Amino acid sequence: MNITDILQSLAGRYVTQSFLHAFIAVIITDGALRAWKIEDPAVKQRFRILTVLFPIFSFPFYQLINPDRGSLLFRTGALFDSGRWMGMALFGVVPLHFFFLFLLAGTTLVFFFQELVPILKHMRESDTEVDEACDPAGKDLVDEALMSLPMARPRTVIIDDGDMVLFSSTGRAPTVFVSSGLLQALNREQVRAALAHEIAHIMRSRRPILLATFLLRMIMFFNPMVLVEFRRAVRNEEKICDDIAVSVTGRPDALAETLKKFYSSPGRSPDAAKKLLSTDVPLEEYSHDLQLESRITRLEKAGLKNRGGGWFPFTIVLLVMSAVCYFVV
Amino acid sequence: MRDRIRRYVYFTMTIVAVFVVLKTLNWIPLVLQQGTLRTYDSIEAVKAKLNIRDIRVPTYFPQSVTWPPSEIWAQTKPYVATLMVFRRAGTIGPALVISQAASDRTALDDRIRILQVKESVPYDLKGRNALLKVGICEQNDVCSRISWNEGNSAMTVTMKSSPFELIKIAEGLVP
């Protein structure tokens, strides 16, 4: 059995079509987000989750309603038949399906090393007991900030580190980790905003929809479009937690100032981040700073005007992408 | 109101753009690669354009089935394959399908789908080891299929009928 036969098998068609369906779903979704000017990160995330989940179920669903979708007649009348491109060869020598498989293999490696391994590591660390009194210097500041927040108080660990460190672990014993360096750099309001943001992450990690999305997303480990969309959904999660923190503290300016401390180079301004492409900073840092900049700009806009599109655009997008992808084989 | 209409227009334009791009991308391989699967008007056209010399045509042909084929499909990429679809006089759907593909590849024979195989037996077709299947197709029609290797080609003949006529047609394809 050679590669062409594998790609024409049921499993091969699932892999190929899920890639194409994800690609089309992303374009349609992005078009809808622009058309309806949707800015609410929670609504945006709903659309992103749709594009992550849609290609998992599209092929089996279409095959169920029409087992003849793989037939010659259907493929010839289809909007797009992947078999035509897969059968082509670059300069008559290198088959195009080789590049497709190379893309899938690359995505699988990225998924494994950048998503699965860190998550497993994170889960192991979450279950590890931490010495809560490792650096009591900022304990009073943290206690004071937590007392004033109308949220369930999580375990908090102050790490003796001069760098700007702030993260939370979820797992069985959710914990907020904050470095002494960060506590020294922030005032009381900023510490409140930072902790509120992390507590929002812990609260939302208990929503089964997010966990279910991640577990299902793992089925699409080979799909580059799903990889990108899942990361965009995760970025939306940061903005959602920003919104929760602002709604609790009422101080978007404090959260914005806190985020500015996290630029990859100390003292870098948001404007400087825009010029990063012309410098020799690593791409990862550049991407990190751009994400921060987008969040800071959003917080600094007066009053976080979230514009959602409700369920109507979502339903239209789902129907349109289902109809278009049916004819993509 | 105007803003709402503008949103729908913008979204519709996105869908139209997706549609046009997909159609164009689907058309490009047909232009770039002569051997991509497509329909042809006649067997002579297939021979001339794709340089496929060995296209087998049955010497026996039942009167109920119309000649020439209602559809002819052929490709040379990713492998050489031809498909001829015949109809019965006065009907629309395919009645007989003759498929010829490179011997180690999948035949393009899905125009008549046997939904339930009632019997599958080896058959000696003029000294060739053939496999004969008899079953039920859509609308409970009896249909049968015979497949064997002929030189470098995998031959498959599928017909909406009992196997008797089918075997006669298949024997007409063997030199």
Image (cartoon, coloured by chain):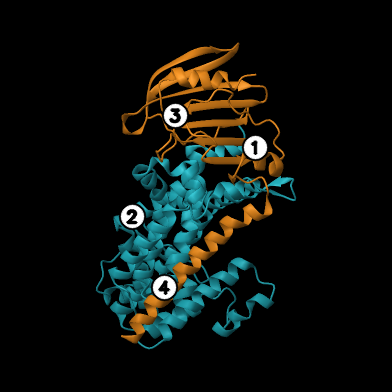
Of residues A66 and A292, which is closer to you in this image?
A66
Of residues B162 and A215, which is closer to you in this image?
B162
Q: Is residue B12 left or right of residue A155?
A: right
Chain B colour is orange
Q: Amino acid at mark 2?
A: Ala
Question: What separation in Å lies between label 2 and label 4 (alpha carbons)?
Answer: 45 Å
**Which circle's residue, 4 or 3, is located before the other in the chain?**
4
| Residue B126 on image: x %, y % | 59, 12
For mark 1, what is the residue?
Answer: B79
For mark 3, what is the residue?
Answer: B64
Question: What separation in Å lies between label 2 and label 1 (alpha carbons)?
Answer: 59 Å
Q: Identify the residue at horizontal 31%, vertical 29% (top origin).
A: B140
Crowd around label 4: few <14 · some 14–19 · many ≥20 (10 Å)? many
Q: Secondary structure at mark 1?
A: loop
Question: Do the numbered discs 4 and 1 sit on residues whose CB atoms are within 8 Å?
Answer: no
For mark 2, what is the residue?
Answer: A173
Of labels 2 and 4, the one closer to you: 4
Q: Is residue A315 left or right of residue A12?
A: left
